[in-house]
């Protein structure tokens, strides 16, 4: 049974995920380099720790939700990192839910399994790591309806089931270490390309004299229907409650999309696979960020890349 959970990275996603673990009755200790993020938890009587190492010392399981690969490497292998217990560690399970590249995930999974456990746990002789990135965004993190895509040993995946169901609605086992990260970057690559395709088609359609709302009706009952057309339409005024209807505020930041496309592109390069749409999408979202739209939702590509309007 999992009782003591350490949670590191209390940002937009992590703070909400940690709250859901607390609501589920787990004994949670948290850490973040941002002191005001920690204060939100200490004010509620939750144990806060100054370093990842201190979190590891009192946890059976540690979950990380950090921006990118370098932050995760630092938290695991840095001087006050999770694995800095003289190679003998307490947590038997490490779950990283950050979106990072599969290569870093595999490197960390092997570093984790090279440690020894202070107290043996069931069938585990060494600690184990799962990569478990999420889909769903901030509202799903808040409501506990995230989708987890999980890579690593299957027994560990099964043992962590109650944790995933406290924070999410769907959990999909993907295979060995790194396959959860691979699933996530592939999902976001397909999402970026479909958003670009829909945006491009709407710009062309409007220029040819068809209104966005008519084209949306057609797409959504035809073969171009997709999440970017029927759930997250990038054209202002077509749908309520999406970032395009509120000046592209909130949602999934363009910087995060550019980061994920960089991960996909680097992974493809490493195995010498040509992915021209990934490269194009990466260049477009990087340009969008360079032009100052990094904090806006990624669907702002419709306004800024295609129509070139600045607001
Ligand atoms: P965020 O920037 O809001 O939060 C990251 C947190 O990590 C911050 O509180 C920061 O202070 C902390 N942090 C950074 N370095 C640290 C360190 N060395 N030690 C301890 N804490 C540290 O990011 P987020 O939106 O919560 O996203 C987290 C991850 O989830 C990213 O990899 C992102 O791509 C992924 N993700 C985000 C969304 C989304 O909609 N925001 C959706 C799915 C996946």
Image (cartoon, rainbow, N blue to C red):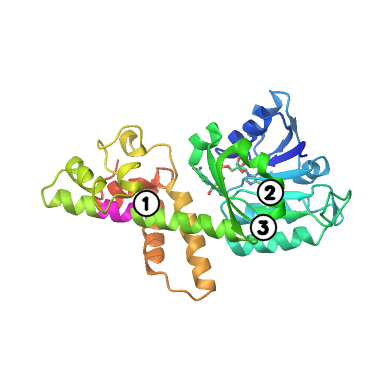
State if disc 3 and disc 2 touch (CB < 8 Å).
no
For label 1, the residue is 291
**Residue 50 percent coordinates (x, y):** 76, 39
**Label 3 neighbour load within 10 Å: few <14, some 14-19, many 20+:** many
Measured in 3D between alpha carbons, the distance from the residue under mark 3 to the one under mark 1, in whole angstroms, is: 39 Å
**Label 1 neighbour load within 10 Å: few <14, some 14-19, many 20+:** few
Task: Determine which quarter of the picture holds residue 27.
Answer: top right
Please state which of residues 111 and 146 is positioned toward the viewer in this rendering: 146
Q: Residue at x 11, y 52 (%)?
A: 208
Q: Quadrant of ligand 1?
A: top right
Q: Is 123 part of what is drawn in magenta? A: no
State if disc 1 and disc 3 touch (CB < 8 Å).
no
Q: Residue at x 73, y 28 (%)?
A: 46
Please state which of residues 99 and 250 is positioned toward the viewer in this rendering: 99
Q: Earlier in the sequence, mark 3 or mark 1?
A: 3
State if disc 2 and disc 1 touch (CB < 8 Å).
no
Callout 3 secondary element: loop
**Residue 23 percent coordinates (x, y):** 65, 27
Q: Earlier in the sequence, mark 1 or mark 2?
A: 2
Please state which of residues 127 and 300 is positioned toward the viewer in this rendering: 127
Q: Which residues are magenta?
A: 195-200
Measured in 3D between alpha carbons, the distance from the residue under mark 2 to the one under mark 3, in whole angstroms, is: 11 Å
Examine the residues drawn in magenta and state their main secondary structure: helix
For label 2, the residue is 158
**Residue 25 percent coordinates (x, y):** 71, 28
Q: Earlier in the sequence, mark 2 or mark 3?
A: 3
Q: Residue furthest top?
A: 44
For label 3, the residue is 152
Callout 1 secondary element: helix
Q: Residue furthest bottom?
A: 272
Please state which of residues 209 and 43 is positioned toward the viewer in this rendering: 209
């Amino acid at each position: 049974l999992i009782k003591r959970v350490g949670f590191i990275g209390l940002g937009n996603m992590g703070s909400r995920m940690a709250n859901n673990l607390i609501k589920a009755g787990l004994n949670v200790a948290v850490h973040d380099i941002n002191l005001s993020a920690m204060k939100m938890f200490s004010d509620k009587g939750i144990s806060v720790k100054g370093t990842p190492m201190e979190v590891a010392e009192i946890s059976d399981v540690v979950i990380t939700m950090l921006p990118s690969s370098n932050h995760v490497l630092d938290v695991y292998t840095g001087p006050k990192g999770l694995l800095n217990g003289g190679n003998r560690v307490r947590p038997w399970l490490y779950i990283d839910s950050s979106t990072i590249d599969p290569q870093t995930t595999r490197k960390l999974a092997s570093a984790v399994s090279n440690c020894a456990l202070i107290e043996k746990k069931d069938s585990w002789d060494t600690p184990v790591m799962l990569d478990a990135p999420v889909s769903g965004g901030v509202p799903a993190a808040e409501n506990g309806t995230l989708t987890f895509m999980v890579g690593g040993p299957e027994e560990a995946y099964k043992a962590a089931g109650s944790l995933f169901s406290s924070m999410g609605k769907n959990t999909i086992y993907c295979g060995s270490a790194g396959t959860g990260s691979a699933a996530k970057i592939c999902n976001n690559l397909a999402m970026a390309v479909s958003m670009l395709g829909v945006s491009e088609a709407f710009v062309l359609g409007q220029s040819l004299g068809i209104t966005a709302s008519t084209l949306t009706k057609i797409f959504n009952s035809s073969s171009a229907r997709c999440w970017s057309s029927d759930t997250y339409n990038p054209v202002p005024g077509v749908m309520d409650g999406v970032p395009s209807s509120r000046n592209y505020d909130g949602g999934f930041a363009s910087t995060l999309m550019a980061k994920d496309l960089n991960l996909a592109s680097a992974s493809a390069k490493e195995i010498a696979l040509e992915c021209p749409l990934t490269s194009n999408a990466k260049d477009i979202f990087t340009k969008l960020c360079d032009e100052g739209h990094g904090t806006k939702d990624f669907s702002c590509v419709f306004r800024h890349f295609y129509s070139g309007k600045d607001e």
